[in-house]
Image (cartoon, rainbow, N blue to C red):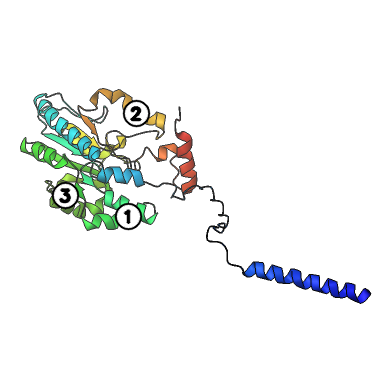
Amino acid sequence: MKIRKEILAVVLVASSFAVACATAKAPMPASVTPAAPAAAPTPAPGPVAVPADDDLNAVVWTQLAVEHDLVFQEIYRAAGEKLLAALKDPAWDALPRGERTGPLAGLPPAVILDVDETILDNSPYAALLVRSGKEYDEFSWRQWCLKKSARPLPGALEFVRSAEGHGVSVYYLTNRAVDLGPATLANLREAGFPAPPESFLGLGTVVPGCEMVGTDKGCRRRLLGKGHRILMQFGDQIVDFVDVASNTPDGRRKEMAPYDSWIGERWWVLPNPTYGSWEPALFDNDWTQSRERRRKAKIDALRAE
């Protein structure tokens, strides 16, 4: 009896195994689709890593937005119309108050123009920085200037030629270093601007009896004012028009407040979203800070309501 039970148990186990194997080997009906494996959950998007001072939108706008060109054309056309009125008014003078040290009577007329982002377009240099993720440095900037390939900004060439045609001298008051004078003048001539050697007043120009502070242009403006009646000034930063004692947002506004009526009359401000003294004003003018800390200071300064 015991042996029969053991034989029966063996038979049952063998039968179960055979059924299981037959089931495993049986083809799946065509109407049944195997379940797809569960998809891995999509990770939540994280922040995109960009340089702390990325200028992509600013450079794209400068190079590709038609609005950029229209603004420049608008400003230079309006300036050309005002220039004729300025020539007829013997009391018209665009030097900041305190920089005019002598009488205007009998002085020949002149206009003062900044160079970079005022009459010459350096956006290709800015584009190189965006593509490489690097920051401005003096060596790469110097190499760009020596290429002498910056193009004229819209409207600038027409204005300068018109001013020269009306007997108005043109001076380029720039913070490019004085040793970049020959390359800058060559670039200006190649772009079509009148550019005699004496028209370039770069950073480092010696003005007897006047001590220049940092990159201030006051001494050089005074030098030009001694021999000319300055009809207009052009620039992309307020330091192109007046020396700024305190480079903070409030300090900059206070410096310009007395000259509000001169904007669009004697002083002509061109847009430049890529760089300027407005930027370090937001982080205590301390360029030794990391890019991330400078970025945080700029974000913290934003008005969100």
Kindly tell me whether residue 137 is visible in this rendering.
no
The residue wearing badge 3 is 188
Q: Which residue is drawn at 41% across and 40% down?
A: 280
Quarter occupied by the C terminus: top left
240 relative to 254, above or below: below
Q: In this view, does 26 lie to the left or right of 264?
A: right
Depth check: give the residue in front, 125 or 36: 36
Image location (x, y in percent) of residue 145: 25, 54
Q: Position of residue 47 (x, y in %)?
A: 49, 47
Residue 100 shown left or right of residue 39 in the figure: left
Residue in view at x 61 percent, y 68 percent = 26
- At label 3, the amino acid type is Leu
| Place of residue 94 in the rendered image (x, y in percent of width and height, measured from the top left) | 20, 29
Q: Which of 22 and 71 is in front in this view?
A: 22
Drawn side of residue 302 relative to residue 5, left or right: left
At label 3, counting other C-alpha atoms closer than 10 Å, the crowd grade (few under 14, some 14-19, many 20 or more) is many
Q: Which residue sits at x=45%, y=38%? A: 298
Disc number at residue 128? 1
Q: Bin the neighbour count of mark 2 within 10 Å (Cα to Cα): few under 14, some 14-19, many 20 and up.
A: some
Between tags 3 and 2, which lies in front?
Answer: 3
Mark nearer the N terminus (3 vs 1) = 1
**Amino acid type of the residue tagged 2 in the rendering:** Glu
Return the residue nearer the eye: 155 or 5: 5
For the N terminus, the image quarter is bottom right
The residue at which mark 2 appears reads as 255
Q: Is residue 189 visible?
A: yes
Query: Which numbered disc, 2 or 1, marks the residue that appears first in the sequence?
Result: 1
Q: How many marks?
A: 3
Give the spatial CA distance, label 3 vs label 2. Answer: 31 Å
